[in-house]
Image (cartoon, grey):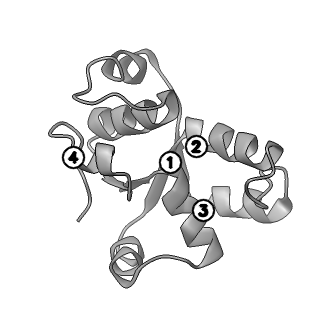
Amino acid sequence: MLNLDTHILLHALDGNLSAAEQRLLAGEAWGISAIVIWEIAKLHQLGRITVDPGDADFSRVLTRVYVWPLNVEICRMSTKLDFVSDPADELIAATSIVHRARLVTRDRKLRGSKLVPIAR
């Protein structure tokens, strides 16, 4: 299963994935960290995106995506990363490490990590 960061999930919903990302996502099940839902809610609240986590369309998407809950192991792992970023990205990265799920991201900090399994 792949772990999608917030922006990759949003790009997938908007149909704005690169050809390589489309091929990658087409071949495997999708998962997201629970923090992704929060981040989408905040981006919507701030008016930065039109995707509304309260919409029925978004709820339908979530029925096809596995949502990993935050737990003690993920929170502890987020403090042991080899990079510093915003807390949401750190929790997303830690989710990939704990669940051994390759992360799909465009974020250079996350992609540069030697700890985070990155989907290529």
Percent position of residue 62, x then y: 65, 56
Q: Which residue is mark 3?
A: 10
Is residue 101 among the parts visible in the rendering?
A: no
Quarter of the view holding residue 20: bottom left
Residue at 78 percent across and 49 percent down: it is: 44
Percent position of residue 36, x then y: 58, 43
Q: Which residue is mark 1?
A: 32
Q: Is residue 13 above or below residue 76?
A: below
Q: Which part of the image, by quadrant, shows the C terminus?
A: bottom left
Whether the residues at callouts 2 and 4 have beta carbons within 8 Å, the answer is no
Label 3 sits on what residue type?
Leu
Label 4 sits on what residue type?
Gly
Q: Which residue is mark 2?
A: 36
Q: Foreground: 49 or 97?
A: 49
Whether the residues at callouts 3 and 2 have beta carbons within 8 Å, the answer is no
Label 1 sits on what residue type?
Ile
Gap between marks 3 and 2 measured at Cα: 10 Å
Q: Nearer the viewer, mark 2 or mark 4?
A: 4
Gap between marks 1 and 3 measured at Cα: 12 Å
Q: Nearer the viewer, mark 1 or mark 4?
A: 4
